[in-house]
Image: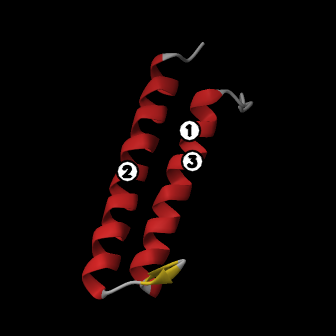
Amino acid sequence: MKIKWDYKTFSLLIGISYIVIGGLVLLYKKFFLPLSNQGSLALGLLLVIYGLYRAYRALKYMKNNEE
């Protein structure tokens, strides 16, 4: 299987990056500056949810456009 580095593949990679960054915010409770527990929870969950959404859309597009 050869990976085509187009927009949707890059979007999948960025989605995974958002998930990882969100997990790190949840784990370390900081994002450039220290965050409160509520702030880190809100930002971390928001980043993880957005990353999941972005990765899902990229995978859905890639699945529908297989050749």
Point out which mark residue 50 bears.
2
What is the secondary structure assignment of the residue under circle 3?
Answer: helix
Give the farthest residue toward the front. 33
Element under label 2?
helix
What SS does tag 1 mark? Answer: helix
x, y percent for residue 24:
49, 76
Q: Specify the amino acid type for callout 2.
A: Tyr
Callout 3 amino acid: Ile
Quadrant location, the N terminus: top right
Identify the disc placed on residue 11: 1
Q: Is residue 7 above or below residue 12?
A: above
CB within 8 Å, label 3 to label 2? no
**Residue 55 pos. (x, y %):** 46, 43
Depth order, front residue of 37/1:
37
User: Which labelled disc corresponds to residue 30?
Assistant: none
Q: Position of residue 9 (x, y in %)?
A: 61, 35
Q: Which mark is residue 14?
A: 3
Residue at point 33% right, 55% down? 49
Q: Residue at x 47, y 34 (%)?
A: 59
Location of residue 17 by image quarter: bottom right
Which one is in front, 17 or 32? 32
Tell me, yes or no, whether the two marked residues, 3 and 1, touch with CB atoms within 8 Å: yes
Answer left or right for 16 relative to 50: right
Q: Amino acid at mark 1?
A: Ser
